[in-house]
Image (tube, helix red, strand yellow):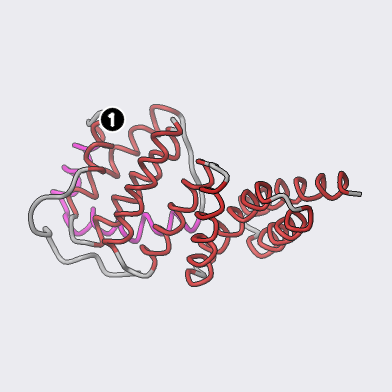
Amino acid sequence: MAGDERELASTLDVLAWSLFFNGHSDRSLEAFEQSVELWQKLGDESGETRALAGVCQVLVAQGDTERADVLSRELLDMSRRHRDTRSEHFAIHFLADCALMRSDFDEAEARYRESLRAALALGDVLETSLEVQGVAMAAAGKGELSRSARLGGAVEALWEARGIAVDVPFWNALLEQHIGSARRQLGAEGEASWAEGRATAFDDAVELALAEPVGEPEAPPPSST
């Protein structure tokens, strides 16, 4: 019955996110893909959009940027057709992640900024802070190390003040690869920039993330780990 299949599709979504956040990415991907298939069978593109966002998230976490990029573009089209602003925000964010992972830092920063504006429109503080981190990682890749450290410090201070904790392994690894490396390369200057960021009002940090950087890169981009 359609009602039973709809309930199963929704249940698979919930299960898939639980599996993802508990480190079972392969099983999570399988559950999300099953959910997508059920929503397609039901002709419910809105449900399919939500499940497809999960598929894209897992693929990004697994580093399958080729498939994630293709499906994130599909997700972007679907979310815009349905005026699903949250899924649209996620699609743009995933495209930014893919660009970052293939070291296309200009594209990554442009996408993270676009996703940042979408998160601001949603009024979602957590998502906004994640996009600021995204801009910071792209900035590090472009050699804008002090800017990267300032943005990273601002997010850390916000999370401490709000009691926010985010522990997603692939995201933690990206933060360390880019922002952590930038901070270490700068040495004492990096610690000063980090402290400056921590003392910056978060709204001002958002403006810094959205602003076009001025001047030449401060140092060669950090090496990949």
Q: Nearer the viewer, residue 1 or 181?
A: 1
- Which SS does the magenta portion mostly show? helix
- Note whether 165 is above or below 220 in the view shown: above
SS at badge 1: helix
Residue name at image x 41 percent, y 33 percent: 121
Is 154 placed left or right of 73 in the picture? left
- Note whether 151 is above or below 144 in the view shown: above
Is residue 173 a member of the stretch shown in magenta? Answer: yes
- Count of number-bearing discs: 1
Q: For residue 75, which quarter of the picture?
A: bottom right
x, y percentage for residue 31? 72, 58
Residue name at image x 54 percent, y 60 percent: 74
- Note whether 102 is above or below 29 in the view shown: below
CA neighbours of label 1 inside 10 A, class few (<14), some (14 to 19), many (20+): few
| Residue at the extreme bottom | 66
- For the C terminus, give its image quadrant: bottom left
Q: Which residues are magenta?
A: 169-197
Please name the amino acid that badge 1 sits on.
Asp
Is 204 placed left or right of 98 in the picture? left
Is residue 43 a member of the stretch shown in magenta? Answer: no
Residue name at image x 78 percent, y 53 percent: 42
Q: What residue does disc 1 label?
A: 203
Q: Nearer the viewer, residue 200 or 84?
A: 84
Residue name at image x 40 percent, y 44 percent: 130
x, y percentage for residue 185? 19, 59
x, y percentage for residue 165? 48, 38
Is 207 placed left or right of 68 in the picture? left
| Residue at the extreme front | 81
Q: Nearer the viewer, residue 169 or 214?
A: 214
| Residue at the extreme right | 1
